[in-house]
Image (cartoon, grey):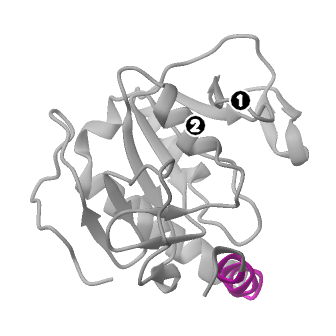
């Protein structure tokens, strides 16, 4: 299957997901993130405002912010790495590219953990996104590089995404059923670190 075909197939699966299933599965992902990254409660992190059918981590992000973790949301500028803007549940928002909400502030952030949505992913840690290359461009540009945590649904696993030279693998992929580590980062290790839990 081509990347284009895989994206079309996975988008169709996302569109068919019931809202109540998304809510319950998103809560499971948040619990797995708490288990895998206890340091997330004090780390600076970025998450994404969910597109339809994607995992929704807004409630979990609000909880981590309440515990003292600085949060950010990405702003898309076409052809450029993402810009991260500080966010709290009280932030004023504005419509960004594709009408995705962005904090209405000129301030920027440099998160140490990125929670990155995966339309699909493979067991080598490579992520299939929506095709814009924004996160690959961002990870290549950020120094020091943040911990890259892919977030997606267990049914979105692929044998391979057919990685290209610009593709950057995730350090960890988290689904409602799995934690799959590909690389460790000091200070944010999981409580236990099995190489994979059943997808």
Q: Residue at x 37, y 29 (%)?
A: 145
- Report the residue marked by disc 1: 80
In the figure, 34 relative to 97: above or below? below
In the picture, which quadrant includes the C terminus? bottom left
Q: Main secondary structure of the magenta part?
A: helix
Residue at the spot x=46%, y=24% of the render?
142
What is the C-alpha distance between the residues marked 1 and 2? 7 Å
- The numbered mark, 1 or 2, whose residue comes first in the sequence reads 1
Q: Which residue is mark 2?
A: 137
Q: Residues within 10 Å of mark 2 (few under 14, many from 20)?
A: some
Over which residues does the magenta segment extend?
5-16
The reply, left or right, for residue 11 in relation to residue 168 is right
Vertical comparison of 51 with 80: above or below? below
Label 2: which secondary element: helix
Q: Residue furthest top?
A: 107
Asked which secondary structure carries label 1, the reply is: loop
Residue 150 x/y as whole percent: 45, 57
Q: In terms of image quadrants, where is residue 176? A: bottom left
- Kindly indicate whether the residue at mark 2 contacts the one at mark 1 (C-beta within 8 angstroms): yes
Question: Which mark is on residue 141?
Answer: none
């Amino acid at each position: 299957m081509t990347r284009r075909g895989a994206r079309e197939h996975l988008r169709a699966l996302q569109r068919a997901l019931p809202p109540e299933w998304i809510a319950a599965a998103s809560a499971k992902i948040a619990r797995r993130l708490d288990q895998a990254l206890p340091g997330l409660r004090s780390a600076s992190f970025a998450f994404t405002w969910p597109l339809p059918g994607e995992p929704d981590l807004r409630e979990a992000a609000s909880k981590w912010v309440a515990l003292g973790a600085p949060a950010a949301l990405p702003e898309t500028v076409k052809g450029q790495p993402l810009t991260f803007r500080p966010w709290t549940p009280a932030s004023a928002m504005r419509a960004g590219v594709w009408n995705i909400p962005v904090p209405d502030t000129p301030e920027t952030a440099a998160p140490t953990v990125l929670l990155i949505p995966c339309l699909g992913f493979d067991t080598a840690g490579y992520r299939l996104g929506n095709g814009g290359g924004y996160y690959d461009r961002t990870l290549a540009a950020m120094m020091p590089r943040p911990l890259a945590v892919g977030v997606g649904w267990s049914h979105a696993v692929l044998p391979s995404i057919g990685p290209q030279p610009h593709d950057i693998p995730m350090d960890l992929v988290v689904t409602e059923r799995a934690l799959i580590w590909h690389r460790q980062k000091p200070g944010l290790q999981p409580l236990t670190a099995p190489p994979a839990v059943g997808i």
